[in-house]
Image: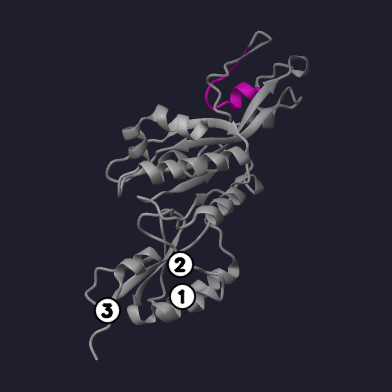
Amino acid sequence: MGEKTINYDRLKQGGFLRQRQKEDLFSMRLRVVGGQLTADQLRALAYASEKYGRGEVHITSRQGLEISYIPFEQTEELLDELEKSDVHQGTCGPRVRGVVACQGNLICPRGLIDAEDIAQKIDKNYFAMELPGKFKFAVTGCPSSCMKVQENDLGVMGGLEPAWEEDKCTHCGLCETVCPVEAIKVKDKELYFDRDKCNLCGQCTEICPTDAWTKAREGYTIYVGGKVGKHPRFGVKLTELVDEATSFKIIDKSLEFFRTEASSGERFGDTIQRVGLDNFKTFVME
């Protein structure tokens, strides 16, 4: 009987990465949405890493997990075992990768959106979608941007536009103190608000003791075209404070644009630059 042929491209598509050792050893990338795992999943991962690997689980830079040193002949057995605990393999290559997210307004005091919920919906709709190149999503709950949405192909950020009610204001100056971008100035019983400077963090509405600062609008700010790597690029703000339905329409149109306009292996931001940002905006926002 001849040697078994290994389809490495198929393994890579499913989240398997061949290691540098001469033996047929693989690292298995696992599908983790927004960094969330249950205790049962963690127990299953610990058991699998000891049984099939070397008892180690690597946490990737994108909130994913990898089990390494898996012999090729045990890969299917490992997958079957993990899937019983609702742990599934990830993906590599030219397709939508796992989405990263912070904990959003369910836990973080500064969170303005349910980042975990949005991440789950993005994963459900787009995970492993075939595209000309890799495509990475990030969701962050507020402009602190803990998940670095500007460094991803498409980033979703929570935002809040404040409104000031003069008759409720005591000019205590707390809002000026917490504003991270100096958009608020309080002097001589006068308050000055520079909307152009405002980064939509909503901290003024949280700290105001008299509710003089209220929510005028809130929603999702979308960044596109970011990436890191050998040729990093900072994403550009496409639109701000749109609702959830509009956000997903923008995502759909962005992926359609990338699918039809990108060259093989090209990243989203490079496609936008080559075709033209104005042309991209016209296509996505029409």
Quarter holding residue 157: top right
Point out residue 249 in the picture as x, y percentages from the top left corner.
56, 41
Point out residue 38 in the picture as x, y percentages from the top left corner.
59, 65
Circle 1 residue: 79
Residue 206 circle label: none
Q: Which of marks 3 and 1 is in front?
A: 3
- Marks 2 and 3, the one that precedes in the sequence: 3
Residue at horizontal 50 percent and vertical 53 percent from the top: 126
Residue 118 seen in this snapshot = yes
Residue 110 seen in this snapshot = no
Q: Could you say whether the residue bearing mark 2 is in a helix, strand or loop? A: loop
Residue at horizontal 31 percent and vertical 34 percent from the top: 274
Q: How crowded is mark 1: few (under 14 residues within 10 Å), some or many (20 or more)?
A: some
**How far apart are the alpha carbons under marks 2 and 3?**
21 Å
Residue at horizontal 73 percent and vertical 15 percent from the top: 166
Circle 3 residue: 5
- In the picture, measured across the screen, residue 162 lies left or right of residue 224, that is right
- Marks 3 and 1, the one that precedes in the sequence: 3
Q: Choose between 220 and 197: the one closer to the eye.
A: 220
Quarter holding residue 5: bottom left
Residue at horizontal 49 percent and vertical 74 percent from the top: 46
Q: Give the range drawn in magenta.
A: 174-186
Circle 2 residue: 89
Point out residue 254 in the picture as x, y percentages from the top left corner.
46, 41
Q: Choose between 119 and 278: the one closer to the eye.
A: 278
